Structure formats: structure tokens, C-alpha cells
Amino acid sequence: MDLLPLLPMPSTPDMTRAYLASDASYDGIFYLAVRTTGIFCRPSCPARKPKPENVEFFAQPKDALGAGYRPCLRCRPLDDEQTPDWAKGLLARIERAPAARWRDEDLRTLGLEPARVRRYFANRYGMTFQAYCRALRLGRAFDRLRGGAKVDDAVFDVGYDSHSGFREAFARAFGQPPGLARRSGSATAARSADSRVVRVTWLETPIGPMIAGATDAGLCLLEFTEPQRLERQLATLRRRAGAALVPADHPHLTAVKRELDEYFAGTRREFDVPADAHGTAFEQRVWSALSRIPYGETRSYEDIARETGNAAAVRAVGHANGRNPIAIVVPCHRVVNKSGELGGYGGGLWRKRRLLHLEKTADKA
């Protein structure tokens, strides 16, 4: 159920101009359906443009589906919908038996084409299917060792056949041998181990899936999982945090999921989950200034530059705003151009419009 209040649809002339220009900034704002083909698309679809007299417009994909139209196979207007059932079933199997080694034959036994699985994991999670499973196994091993388990037990609990293979994979992922990850009486040693892993999970929201990452210090990643940006986002986080990313649960991830649900329902205006963003000193000042923008209000890049103590640093503020790794919780969507135009947004301008619309209309709901 989409809890987000819908933006009013643009005028028909505006929507016509947008789809004829393949304007991606309108993606998610409306969908066009072509009467002569029975197909509906995003405005940015690269397919040949239909004549305006053959087009009708819809606010949501479900409206177009309800009118009998089929999704376009080129622009895939349903790709931002929630996790498909086949993927939910596969993820549940992996969670129940993380030590299992998956082969193509195993996937085919479940009626899944291996190429489809690989493509889905690459686009959604920024890693191959096998890398996802391996990261999950190593994450479980890390937690077992920190809980005091013996290395011998961890090796076989997570499905490794040999000590040498396990030690090599563990050291490559976490930058230390598995013996050092065991919990000790030293608080310094425990903090050192914590700093070498970021727990990550994937969340569904009314405006598309997101990836969230957390350390024990707080939330360090919250981004929309756009395939063209995800790999770069994850590589940047690994480099800045100096940590391996492993699929796992964490109290901060549970908290941000609950708080996001409340935010999209219009019942939460401030987030309580702590942030642990990794950036330069200047970026940290910018992100701190973003966090002080009140719900339902906006600030210009010039405003943020002045607040950081350097009114001339407008362009640098724009770059730091774009590198904010914690979307929504650190509300970079509330920064607009001095003229009042939206400016840019890594998650797509249509998402920025909807977030601002949600905050503007929450009092009226």
C-alpha cells in the first residue's frame, strides 16, 4: 500500500512535452499508456514516441494495469515495485540456511533461471548472487566469533570445508584473521572489531527500495538502490568506513525501518536513529546543517554555505550535499536552488518532489 500522498499530476501539455523529450525528471510523477499498442511506459522511455492523440496518462502503474495496459519491456515501469515473490522465497531460503552453497542446478530446481537471479542481485544489491551469499556467511561467522565461538566451530557452522579457505576469505573481507575477531575483555579490541564490519539490509519504501547500513555507532548508509549508482555508493562506503559490508540484522537497521514507515505514513517528523556518516570535516559540517533544516521547510545552497561559516562555498556545499550517504534521515532533499527550483537529487527529482510534497501536506492529511 502506497502511504505517500500523491503529487497532483502535471497538466496534459506538460506531460506531453515531458514524454516527447524523454525527460527522466518526470519518472514516477506520471506514466503514459499507448492505446495503439496496449503498453504503458515511464516518461523517459527510449522507445519511439507515440502521437499525443494515442496517449493517456496515469498517476500510478496500478492505474495503468487496471485499465488493461501491459508494462513496457524497455523502460520497465514496474521495476521500482516491491520485491517479487520469487526473490522473497529465495532470500528466505538463504536466511534459513546461510551455509548452503548454491549452484545453477539448485536455482533451476526452484524454477529460477540463474541469469535472471544474477541480474536481479546485481541491480538490487550491487553484488553478484554468490557474493551476497558469501557475505552473509562471513557476517554470521563474524558475529559468532565476536560472541566467543571457537574458530573451528565458526568454520563449519557457515559452510566452509577447510580452515585455510575460511581464514583467507575472512581476512580478505575484514582485514584481520578470524582469531582477532573473538570477543575479549578489552573494550578497545571490541571497538576495533566493530569498525571492520557494516551490517546492511534492503528496505521497501513507497518510492522504491533502499539499502541501509549500520555500525554499532549508528546509521552510515541509506540510499535508493539505483543500479547505475549502487556499485559506486557501496565502494565509497567500503573505502571511507574501512569496513566490509555484510547482510545482517542490527538494532539501528530495525529502528530506521520502523521510523521510515512512520515518516512515510506522515506520523514522524524527526528521526531518532543515530547517524555515523563517514566524510571529510567540511562534509560533516554540511550534513550537520542539513539535519537542522526543519520538517516541511527548505533551504538554499547559499543558506547552507553561510551556516557552515563560508558563504562563498556554494559549489562545495552542492558537492557535499550530493555525497550525503544517509538520504531522508539527513534531509538533503530539503535543499533547493536560490530561485526555488529543485536543483539536483541523487535519488531522482521525482523522489525529491514526492518527499517535499509529503512534508508539505502532512498537516493537511
Image: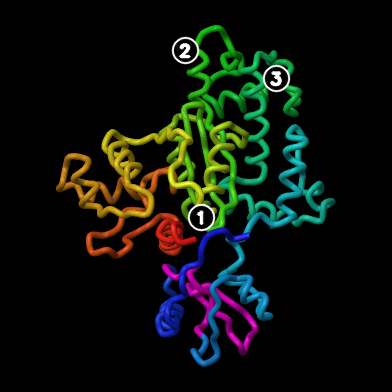
N-terminal of the pair, mark 3 or mark 2, is 3
Q: Quadrant of the N terminus?
A: bottom right
In the rendered structure, which segment of residues is drawn in magenta? 25-49
In magenta segment, residue 209: no
Direction top: furthest residue? 185
Residue at numbered disc 3: 163
Instruction: Tell which of 20 and 231 is nearer to you.
Output: 20
For the residue marked with disc 2, what is the amino acid? Answer: Thr
Tell me what residue is drawn at x 47 percent, y 52 percent: 229
Q: CA distance from mark 2 to mark 1?
A: 37 Å
Q: CA distance from mark 3 to mark 1?
A: 37 Å
N-terminal of the pair, mark 2 or mark 1, is 2
Whole-percent x and y of residue 292?
32, 42
Residue at numbered disc 2: 188
Residue 358 as seen in the image, left or right of residue 293: right
Tell me the chief SS of the magenta region: loop
Disc 3 element? helix
Residue 310 as seen in the image, left or right of residue 190: left
* Residue 141 in which image quadrant: top right
